[in-house]
Image (cartoon, grey):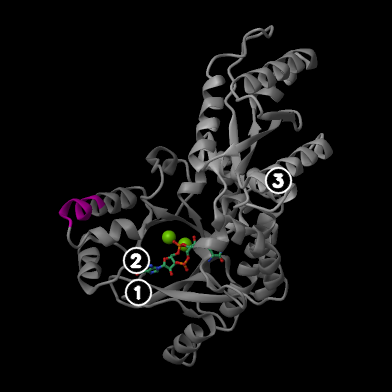
Amino acid sequence: MLNRESIFNAIEECVAAANAAGEHFAVLILRVPGLREISLRFGYAQGEQAEDKAHALTRDSLRPGDQVFRAGDDSFVVLLPSIANHNHAMLAGTRLIHAFEQPLDGTASPWLVRPVMGIAIYPEHGPGADHLCRRAGMALDESQRRGEPCTIYRQHDIQIEIFYEELREALDANRLRVFFQPIVNLRTGRIAGAESLARWSSPKHGEVSPANFVPFSEQSDLISILTRWSVNATMRHMASLHGAPELSFSINFSPRVLSRPGMVEQLLGALDIWGVAPTSIVVEITETTLVNDLEVSIQVLRRLREHGMRIAIDDFGTGYASIAYLRQFPATELKLDQSLIAGMRNDPHAAKLVRAIITMAHNMDLSTVAEGIEEQVTQDMLADIGCDYGQGFHLGRPEPAADFIRRLSASRPADS
Ligand code: C2E
Ligand code: MG
Ligand code: MG
């Protein structure tokens, strides 16, 4: 942050004033992404002109007593003293957004910029400048992720700060565990394989769900470490089966990792080390997240296909289901999200929708897996419709990988 010393000093002055008056105040970080682009397109002189204009617009939409600081190419820090509550801070934020609704006139090229911002409030969100700025910054990231103009820091994000070091340490020390959940062939009723699911028992937080720590890992380098761990840990368990070509194991991949250089080589290297056949691996990619880096993801997935791995589109039916890009995708299977499956039993429309999706998938030569089967009725309905595979608590809960492998080995003929 440019100008950090003066910003931090001003915040500490606000802290002292707020303490004396028993009041709250807000730190707002404003990013105006279009500003940098103006410099790049039209030159630095115009960029600076636009920056001045944005600075002036910001100042004019605030109350007397509020302060604005430049904090980088396209960012500003705004201090709002004597804020009564969160709503007041949001109001100030919304006023700022409105101020930017017209093009930055007065500059040589009128240019429409859309600011995003994050807000942290003293004292709830931190005792001093460092905490408040970092948390306003996290709220800003959250705004960008959600595509919203303005977000107030949420307390639960504190977990994120605690998590990083601990999760990193847990990964380094190999303290995460792999669970396998069976995937069952709905025609024969036999186990066709399993999905690998990460489990983290943290001494401090107890059982942390991957629904929490995976999206959080995706925001940093942790996702690469998590994926490498997950690939190796899954294959290590597969190797202990001593060859079972009829079984396949699904591994979840974040598209962010998929687009990293060296990804394919890493996966091939792991297959080699553990002596696992590529044909017994299914790479699962969530449908919602496919949208990022689509081109790169498609290329990487094509290479995996060429090597014989299969590709599943996970959680189908939750995202902005784009049948158009399904066509260009080198997928081999479609996993219908549990939210679709859960509705089938009592809702004839949901059942029709599932049937239609399965028919469509089959027409595109994709096999189908229904997630979240919780009752026999649902399993029967899916088998009737012609869904190929099923997964869910009714068919088997996720269990420690070693237990799954042991059970499976015991039930297989000794010579296989
Ligand atoms: P997913 O890939 O869609 O995995 C299926 C999730 O549904 C699992 O949640 C599983 O426990 C849960 N589930 C299975 N059957 C049922 C059912 O009948 N009813 C209900 N209500 N839930 C069921 P889990 O293990 O909490 O994982 C959540 C998500 O986290 C996964 O969703 C996957 O996207 C991600 N994930 C898990 N492990 C990893 C990993 O090692 N790497 C990456 N990148 N992502 C992972
Ligand atoms: Mg999955
Ligand atoms: Mg899923």
The residue to which callout 2 is attached is 372
The residue to which callout 1 is attached is 393
Q: Secondary structure at mark 2?
A: loop
Is label 2 or label 3 in front? 3
Residue drawn at x 74%, y 30% is 69
Cα distance between the residues tagged 2 and 3: 50 Å
Q: Hey, which residue is sitting farthest front in the picture?
A: 20
Foreground pick, 146 / 355: 146
Mark 2 vs 1: CB contact within 8 A: yes
Q: Position of residue 265 (x, y in %)?
A: 70, 58
| Ligand 1 contact, mark 1 (Cβ < 8 Å) | yes
User: What's the residue type where badge 3 is placed?
Assistant: Val
Is residue 214 visible to us here?
yes
Cα distance between the residues tagged 3 and 1: 52 Å
Q: Is residue 203 above or below residue 65?
A: below
The residue to which callout 3 is attached is 15
